[in-house]
């Protein structure tokens, strides 16, 4: 069987990863609040006790 590089993920994990990657786009001083908010949202998704 061919080597597969695809790692199946739950939809929640995909959104968390995308939010974390998108947050990297906001590293200018005047946009750090956007980066922080996206990281917080990703943390909520990664936390099982978060908002459902």
Image (cartoon, helix red, strand yellow):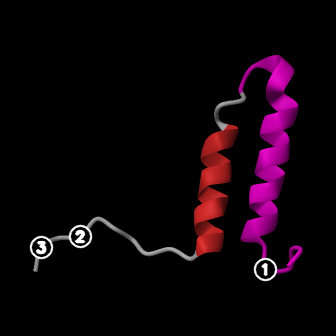
Is disc 3 placed on a helix, strand or loop? Answer: loop
Compared to residue 45, the image places residue 31 above or below, namely above
Segment colored magenta: 27-52
The image's mark for residue 2 is: 3
- Callout 1: 10 Å neighbours few (<14), some, many (20+)? few
Residue 35 falls in image quadrant: top right
Residue 30 falls in image quadrant: top right
The residues bearing labels 3 and 1 have C-alpha atoms spaced at a distance of: 35 Å
Residue found at x 83% / y 53% = 40
> What quarter of the picture does the C terminus occupy?
bottom right
Q: Residues at badges 3 and 1 in contact (C-beta under 8 Å)?
A: no
Q: Is residue 6 left or right of residue 13?
A: left
- The tag earlier along the polypeptide, 1 or 2, is 2
The residue identified by callout 1 is 48
- Chief SS of the magenta region: helix
Residue found at x 81% / y 19% = 29
The residue identified by callout 2 is 4
Compared to residue 9, the image places residue 33 above or below, namely above
Is disc 2 placed on a helix, strand or loop? Answer: loop
Compared to residue 47, the image places residue 31 above or below, namely above
Compared to residue 40, the image places residue 2 above or below, namely below
- Callout 2: 10 Å neighbours few (<14), some, many (20+)? few
Give the x, y percent position of residue 11. Answer: 60, 72
């Amino acid at each position: 069987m061919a080597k597969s590089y695809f790692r199946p993920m739950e939809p929640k994990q995909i959104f968390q990863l995308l939010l974390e990657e998108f947050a990297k786009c906001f590293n200018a001083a005047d946009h750090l609040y956007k980066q922080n908010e996206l990281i917080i949202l990703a943390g909520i998704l990664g936390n099982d006790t978060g908002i459902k």
